[in-house]
């Protein structure tokens, strides 16, 4: 029997619903929620035949039922049963992966419709197989398992040259939208996920003094200027790791970048402003850009901005005393315009917020682009009929997450000095081509 590291997942989920008369998304859009894990169909026989007796979404395949039933307190048997798990798996690296199945009694695995492991026999032990996969690509995955008699176990793990062996985590597993469990919904399949749990900690720790990197850290290409690090066992929305960006007064940029290639993009992430965060300066929390790889110039930028709003009677309240925040999307370099109405909501430090942004680029030369922002499932901004990229044909090719801290708003120097540092955390990033939802 081989040793198996059990991955224990915890989650902090404290959501503040933004006010100001915002409207919830209609049910048709909420139905497309991401469901992490795989759909499990449980049969009351050892041959996967007939109608499943139980159907649910399992976060991972990491079960040690011993001599008990997978459904204690029900009539589902402890012996002579079988399970079929199906869904999508999204690798983090473009490498050859080794998959491992430890089973008692028999199991087999398909990835991308290829039979990777075949151990459909009455025995106990671990089998493995390899397959080459591309990073941030959703592949079909299917695991079939049967239990004859005695103890029952099933564990699915993987490893690659850049990743130590681990149970395949729920953050890289997704249902295919065929129902069977709470929240499986419409089966959004993300093209990129990042939970910061398996980033290269050494790479993050060896950044240059200006914050830049000598090599990519996991899927993230670079961090610029302001300090950014992996927060471990300090603050996380799920698991133990998150991106931590630390800003001093007038510091700019702590942004992790990763490549994409999309003209219609949905980005969801969780953000947390540490208690005492100074909102006097503007925070640019998300960036989508199209860069010319040859000239290194930007064709266009799209930036999500969070900043303090003006105080009463037209005075400038940049000292952070006004709890309202102004949220908007801005297109830079091309037309320099807002992509929808500026919205005031209340953001409170010390809470996790779920943020989602949609951008649909215009047809080159036409004004038919679209943009939307959601906070905790509430749509707070919508813009249509937009000219986002002019006549450019290039898609969004870089996504930046983490944020910039503004070099100072008008009249900011008349404010008292802000707190010495302001800290913002980002976790659980999902990129997809359709509405992700709550």
Image: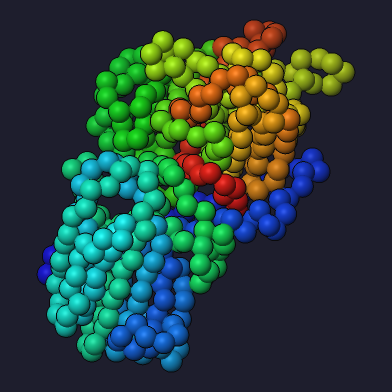
**Picture mark count:** 0
Q: How is the image coloured?
A: rainbow
Q: Nearer the viewer, residue 410 or 151?
A: 151
- Left or right of 371: which side holds 354? left
Q: Nearer the viewer, residue 240 or 108?
A: 108
- Left or right of 199: which side holds 116? left
Which quarter of the rendering shows the N terminus? bottom left
Q: Is residue 431 above or below residue 188?
A: above
Farthest residue toward the left?
A: 1
- Residue 95 percent across, percent down from the top left: 23, 43
Farthest residue toward the bottom?
A: 75
- Residue at the image position 18 percent from the left and 43 percent from the top: 161
Q: Quadrant of residue 209?
A: top left
Q: Is residue 10 above or below residue 354?
A: below
- Residue 52 percent across, percent down from the top left: 44, 83
- Residue at the image position 59 percent from the left and 56 percent from the top: 32
- Residue 230 percent across, percent down from the top left: 36, 34
- Left or right of 348: which side holds 62? left
Q: Is residue 28 above or below residue 47?
A: above
- Residue 71 percent across, percent down from the top left: 41, 82
Regarding residue 2, the answer to whether it shows in the image is: yes
Q: Nearer the viewer, residue 420 or 432?
A: 432
- Residue at the image position 61 percent from the left and 38 percent from the top: 358
């Amino acid at each position: 029997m081989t040793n198996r590291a059990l991955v224990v997942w915890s989650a902090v989920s404290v959501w503040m619903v933004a006010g100001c008369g915002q409207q919830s998304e209609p049910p048709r859009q909420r139905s497309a929620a991401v469901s992490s894990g795989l759909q499990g169909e449980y049969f009351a026989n050892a041959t996967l035949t007939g109608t499943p007796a139980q159907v649910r979404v399992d976060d991972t395949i990491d079960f040690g039922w011993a001599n008990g039933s997978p459904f204690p307190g029900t009539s589902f048997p402890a012996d002579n049963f079988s399970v079929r798990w199906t869904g999508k798996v999204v690798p983090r690296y473009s490498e050859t992966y080794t998959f491992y199945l430890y089973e008692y009694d028999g199991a087999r695995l398909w990835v991308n419709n290829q039979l990777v492991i075949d151990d459909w026999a009455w025995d106990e032990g671990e089998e493995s197989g390899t397959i080459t996969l591309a990073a941030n690509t959703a592949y079909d995955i299917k695991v079939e398992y049967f239990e004859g008699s005695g103890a029952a176990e099933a564990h699915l793990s993987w490893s690659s040259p850049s990743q130590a062996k681990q149970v395949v985590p729920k953050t890289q597993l997704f249902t295919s939208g065929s129902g069977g469990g709470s929240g499986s919904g419409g089966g959004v399949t993300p093209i990129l996920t990042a939970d910061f749990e398996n980033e290269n900690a050494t790479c993050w720790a060896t950044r240059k003094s200006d914050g830049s990197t000598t090599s990519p850290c996991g899927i993230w290409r670079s961090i610029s200027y302001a300090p950014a690090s992996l927060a471990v066992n300090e603050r996380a929305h799920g698991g133990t790791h998150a991106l931590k960006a630390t800003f001093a007064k007038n510091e700019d940029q702590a942004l992790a970048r990763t490549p994409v290639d999309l003209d219609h993009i949905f980005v969801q992430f969780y953000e947390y402003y540490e208690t005492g965060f100074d909102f006097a300066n503007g925070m640019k929390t998300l960036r989508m850009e199209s860069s010319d790889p040859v000239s290194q110039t930007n064709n266009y930028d799209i930036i999500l901005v969070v900043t303090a709003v003006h105080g009463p009677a037209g005075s400038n309240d940049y000292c952070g005393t006004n709890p309202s925040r102004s949220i908007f999307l801005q297109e830079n370099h091309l037309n320099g315009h807002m992509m929808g109405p500026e919205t005031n909501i209340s953001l409170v430090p010390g809470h996790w917020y779920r943020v989602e942004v949609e951008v649909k680029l215009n047809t080159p030369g036409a004004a038919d682009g679209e943009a939307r922002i959601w906070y905790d499932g509430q749509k707070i901004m919508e813009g249509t009929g937009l000219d986002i990229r002019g006549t450019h044909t290039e898609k969004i090719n870089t996504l930046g997450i983490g944020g910039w801290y503004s070099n100072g708003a008008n009249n900011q120097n008349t404010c008292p000095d802000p707190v010495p540092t302001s800290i913002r955390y980002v976790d659980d990033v999902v990129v997809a081509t359709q509405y992700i939802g709550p």
